Image (cartoon, rainbow, N blue to C red):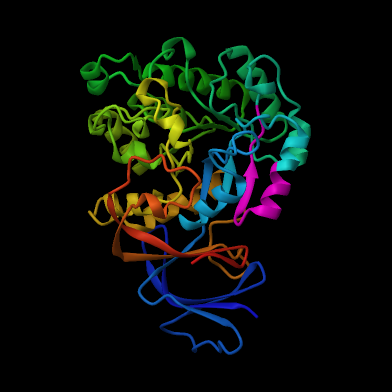
Amino acid sequence: MGIWIVNGFTVSADNVQTKQHIFVEGDKIVQVLNAETDAQPNTEGHTVLDASGKLVAPGFIDMHVHLREPGFEHKETIATGTRSAARGGFTTIACMPNTRPVIDTVDTVNYIKDKAETEGVVRVIPYGCITKNELGRELTDFAALKEAGVVGYTDDGVGVQSAQMMKDAMALAASLGMPIIAHCEDNTLVEGAAVTEGAFAKKHGLKGIPNESEAIHVGRDVLLAEATGVHYHVCHVSTEQSVRLIRHAKQFGIKVTAEVCPHHLVLSDEDIPGMDANWKMNPPLRTPRDVQAVIEGLEDGTIDMIVTDHAPHSEEEKEKGMQLAPFGILGFETAFPLLYSKFVVTGKWTLGFLVDRMTAKPADVFGLPYGTLHAGSAADITIVDLETEQEVLKEEIVSKSKNTPFIGWKLQGWPVTTIASGNIVWS
């Protein structure tokens, strides 16, 4: 028995919308019919999902998430995190290695994969650490981690402070045909700071995180990537200077790609209502000028994709206040409706552009066989109701944690059904 998704419409990257019927059997899309021109499908004996008036998209892909397991299960687990991802329409997620223990050995990679297989509901691909224990002192066994199935190497959560260490890592990754994914932050510029160096920091007498703390590492690493030939991917770009450096690097043919988070596209430090740590994230919310720069960077292709940086923390931790609480906000469940409401409904972006940056683009950058809706494609499908406006309610959040600044926001574009590897995992 398979699943027929009937009467929904798909959208291409150049925004051509087509009414289609899609048949899923096992973990593959078997048939795609044009609802206007092809014969009606024989759906007898199969599950039928009527998607009339709804968007049928490839399952969203999120290449930057924190599932917190092992070690921080009070914040999130692979079980709760993948369910939260499914609610947000994501079917493939790449988890960062700053767990406890960190993902710096084959055993930990296997632990993640086994847990995801038995307790997860969407596809989980782990990253491996660049350095042992993310301490920046000694490289991990890149070859063994590649063999175990990591998608790339990163010390996300901390920047690699030594240029020599980063150059060695890039050279080794390049020799294995693997990417380096960089959290860009110069520690000497950020110690003791909780928000960006801007209006909010000034108003509240807080030490600010300057833009240069990110951009200095981007500039350094772009030069190292040019020297080593590695595929270098910049995490959660948030500053005007970083966008400028990445744009320049791409013009010179350096193999650099980049990502941006929804919160850096829709919020600035001037939106922070007060000392509520649910507005504290790393990188921090930047100035309106930076927000405009990252929007333009995404629009002109300087930034390749959208990721969530889903970063759950417990309420107790976030209640410690802006200065002491950990950095990070939830991302999965609001990502698409937030961007659809802010950019597509308002006519700034086409629907095709948004879907492409959350599906085909991340798949293409990381060489993943997902993000398309053709016969033979993986049966990863998200059905979205573009019309209904719903409020973000704390009690409806599926994640184990509730740390988001978007509670109370009214948004459109909610995923209503998520199919991962042929299984309905959210409805």
Q: Position of residue 37 (x, y in %)?
A: 44, 84
- Residue 65 against residue 158 in the figure, above or below: below
- Residue at image location 43% in from the left, 36% down from the top: 315
- Residue 361 against residue 170 in the figure, above or below: below
The answer to whether residue 22 is magenta is no
Q: Position of residue 235 (x, y in %)?
A: 49, 32
Q: Quadrant of the N terminus?
A: bottom right
Q: Position of residue 347 (x, y in %)?
A: 24, 55
Q: Residue furthest front?
A: 316
- Residue 39 against residue 131 in the figure, above or below: below
Side of 337 relative to 2 (left or right): left
Side of 383 relative to 423 (left or right): left
Q: Position of residue 49 (x, y in %)?
A: 49, 77
- Residue at image location 24% in from the left, 32% down from the top: 273
- Residue 281 against residue 41 in the figure, above or below: above
The answer to whether residue 124 is magenta is yes
Q: Residue furthest top?
A: 188
Disc tally is: 0
Q: Quarter of the image holding residue 193?
A: top left
Start-end of magenta stretch: 112-129
Judge whether residue 375 can be spotted in this image: yes
Side of 29 relative to 426 (left or right): right
Side of 321 relative to 217 (left or right): left
- Residue at image location 25% in from the left, 29% down from the top: 274
Judge whether residue 131 can be spotted in this image: no
- Residue at image location 30% in from the left, 29% down from the top: 290
